[in-house]
Amino acid sequence: MIDFSLGDEQKALQQLARDFAQSEIAPVALQYDKEPAFPGEIIKKAHQAGLMNLTCPREYGGQGLGLLDAALITEELNAGCSAIAGMIGINSLACGPILVAGTEEQKRRFLIPLNESGKTASFGLTEREAGSDAGSLKTRARREGDHYVISGQKCFITNGSFASLYTIFATLDPEKGTRGISAFVVARETPGVSIGKVEDKMGQRSLNAAEVNLDDVAVPVENRLGAEGEGFKIAMKTLDEGRINIAATAVGIARAAFEAAVQYAKQRRQFGKPVGTFQALNFMLADMAAAVDAARLLTWYAASKADQEQPVTREAAQAKYFAADVAMRVTTDAVQIHGGYGYTKEYPVEKYMRDAKLTQIYEGTNQINRLVAGGALMR
Ligand code: CAA
């Protein structure tokens, strides 16, 4: 028999994250949505509470948790506010390449100071003309003695404005396609690194998304991760785990919207009865509950497989697109159940709907994730 119950330690982690989300994140979520800002104080408290750098091993200053444990925490934080939770969680993606391909020395040199200080990092893959087609990126790296000199522009970089270091993907030889790409760690203070346009987004508004300009940035050779030309695979392996995180994010948003809808449907009365007792809405709520549960189970399944060190390219992609589609549907239905009030800022559901949309787009659009899953099925 499959046991879906959580252990005592997992329940404690879940409760810790739930309490943090409800006391530190949810009460300010609308304010951060209205006036996007860096949630520095909240990130600091999350760091102190052990809710950051979840899957990074303890010897490098992280929490040393598995992906399933991290998914429990991520769901709770995102039920509070996905923009703030995203800023708390960004190091997992940003540091993924260091864990995937870094040497022992690199892991110690980059991860320990970052994790111990509570600072944040960013993952720099996307460019204006290289979004879904990440392999066509144009940022160039050229070797000059004991340095690489990197030039180019990254965009939509989550936390780009505030990162203390970046994992940057650049090509040494565009002729080689994905096999020409290498991965580098670039410190924010390196001359030539600057921040460009910051996106003004529909949802997850405090999740900073910025252009990062690299203008003849000299990076020591010992900051290259893996061998020359391995960068694309390092990015893809990082995204395999990152997509589980996005699935948990989507479950968190969907659950928050579902809970708000249930509460409203019990309390709002029309024709002399709570609106949730009318079959039209009652069936919607039942479908929403089933969808959230299904998305969570797919997320847990992918996370558990990753924890057993099994390949999860397909499972992570499926959990990501399924959960993101669920989040979009459930949040839209939550607005519908609230009627006219749902369309106003008096209730949180319109924010959940705007926030959910991003989960269908980042870390690979849902179409790209279907392509990844479908491709795995044909191999
Ligand atoms: N693990 C290991 N290796 C992998 C891999 C994986 N999951 N996926 C692909 N590879 C390898 C392939 O085996 C192939 O290797 P060889 O050169 O040895 O043959 C190589 O990588 C190239 O693979 P493809 O031919 O499949 O590459 P492609 O150019 O067709 O692209 C893609 C594949 C899946 C579409 C990829 O470009 C992709 O994932 N695109 C989406 C990018 C993305 O998700 N961006 C998100 C940015 S970060 C973000 O949004 C987050 C944020 O800020 C919060």
Image: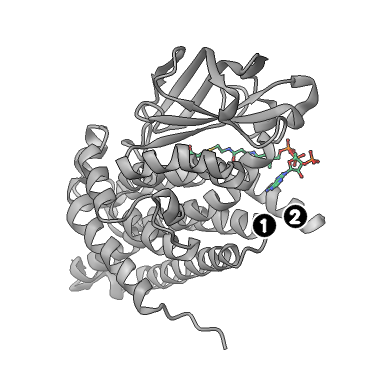
Q: CA distance from mark 2 to mark 1?
A: 6 Å
x, y (%) of residue 267? Answer: 18, 68
Residue indicated by mark 2:
376
Which secondary structure lies at badge 1?
helix
Q: Quadrant of residue 191?
A: top left
User: Left or right: where does residue 244 sit relative to residue 176?
Assistant: left
The amino acid on which the numbered mark 1 sits, given as a three-letter code, is Arg
Task: Name the quarter showing ligand 1.
Answer: top right
Query: As displayed, is residue 156 above or below residue 44?
Result: above
Question: In terms of depth relative to the viewer, which is nearer, 171 or 338?
Answer: 171
Question: In terms of depth relative to the viewer, which is nearer, 193 or 22?
Answer: 193
* Label 2 crowd bin: few (<14), some (14–19), many (20+), radius 10 Å: some
> What residue appears at the point 46 percent right and 21 percent down from the top-left corner?
212
Mark 2 touches mark 1? (CB < 8 Å): yes
* Label 1 crowd bin: few (<14), some (14–19), many (20+), radius 10 Å: many
Query: As displayed, is residue 59 above or below residue 34?
Result: below
User: Left or right: where does residue 188 sit relative to residue 256?
Assistant: right
Question: In terms of depth relative to the viewer, which is nearer, 181 or 245?
Answer: 181
x, y (%) of residue 213? Answer: 48, 16
Q: Quadrant of residue 273?
A: bottom left
> What residue appears at the point 41 percent right and 35 percent down from the top-left corner?
121
The amino acid on which the numbered mark 2 sits, given as a three-letter code, is Ala
Residue placed farthest to the bottom in the image? 1
x, y (%) of residue 85? Answer: 34, 48
User: Which quadrant is home to the C terminus?
Assistant: bottom right
Query: As displayed, is residue 8 above or below residue 324?
Result: below
Tell me which numbered mark, 2 or 1, is placed earlier along the sequence: 1
Residue indicated by mark 1:
314
